[in-house]
Amino acid sequence: MRFCYVGHKFHQKTRSNAFFLDVLNEVGKVDEFYSSPDEDASADDPLVAELSRSSFDAYVFWQTEYVAERLLPLGLGRFILAPMYDGAAGRPATFWRQFVDAQFISFSRTHHEDLQRLGLKTAYFQYFPEPELAQYDFGSSLSAFFWERRPGQEPKFQSIIKLCEQLGVEALHVHAAPDMGLGPAARLNWPDQFDLGDIKVTVSRWFEDRDDLDKLISKRHFVFAPRALEGIGMSFLEPMARGQIVVAPDRPTMNEYLRHRTNGLLYDFDNVHLDYVPTKQSLQELSRGALRTVSVGHRLWQMDQDRLKSLILNDGRRWSTKDASSHYRNGLQRRASARVSAA
């Protein structure tokens, strides 16, 4: 089977989509194309023109449903959409309803249930990376990491400092490398290190090699989630897989993976404040909870890949699932049947 894969340009650098591309490559041949929602809409004109003349067995849109919308009237064939919650949350129901014949792959339970309420074909998956089983000494001086991906938007630097003060963090590293299209971070003019009260702040701007960034992140005890909403959430899943403690807004998809005071810490996004300050002993328990969550989750993800491949291939196989949210779809179907019978 030949797949046309249209992905987000940002992932060409981060390769955070690699696990999904691996699955596609196991079941067929994949031609990759990339787009960015942060660029002007006209930037996709050459891509749309090229794909309008194409002939693939299936078209996969990874966080690029806006490209799928432009191609939809052409009747190219089967569409598979994998939206991410951070980009999908603001779209109206009318946008999603046009994809009534498409297969959705949902990595956010919240969005999965929204799509089910609209009567769309959606399957929910939860991805976990392989655990690294690192060891952290929470009895020592505490440190934290914050990637400032959206300068001027919450979570802001000032909010992170407030949380650091609550947690007793003595050293904070700020990676001032904003998302594409958002311009330079204000931290570009800051010195590489300075003191802010009792907190020692260090700053980095960008790394050509992703491994250099990962090494920097992995040295810290806490990792602050960088955005108000997430897609799959590699920014917090990878730290969890190392046993670091993630501190995140109580919003999707963070709160779909993190359980407050069990495997991480969640805070009220509208009033940035922790309602619980863990002891050094409980920090160790939170770390163990994060590792256990990822260990179990990764094993389940591996077991669930056959279901994912089956849906991608559209082979007609039926799969049982423990996904309780499937009852939303069942309920919709029962009500629709009742209306037809009564007519």
Image: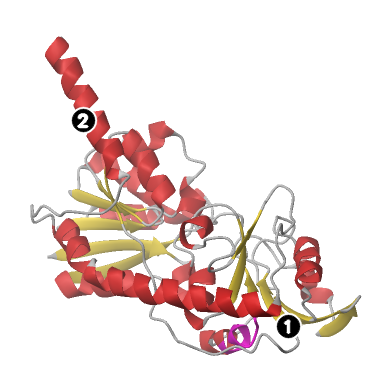
- Residue 156: image location, x then y, percent: 74, 60
Residue 142 - label: 1
Residue 335: image quadrant is: top left
The residue drawn where x is 67% and y is 77% is 145
Q: Earlier in the sequence, mark 1 or mark 2?
A: 1
Image: 317 above or below 26: above
Query: Where does label 2 land, which residue?
Result: 333
Is 216 included in the stretch rendered in magenta? Answer: yes
- What amino acid type is highlighted by mark number 1? Leu
- Outermost residue on the left side: it is 316
Residue situated in front as seen by the camera: 204 or 224? 224
Q: CA distance from mark 1 to mark 2?
A: 52 Å
How busy is the neighbourhood of tag 2: few (under 14 within 10 Å), some, or many (20 plus)?
few
The residue drawn where x is 69% and y is 63% is 183
Is 76 included in the stretch rendered in magenta? Answer: no
- Residue 227: image location, x then y, percent: 61, 60
Residue 321: image quadrant is: bottom left
Q: Which residues are magenta?
A: 215-222
How busy is the neighbourhood of tag 1: few (under 14 within 10 Å), some, or many (20 plus)?
some
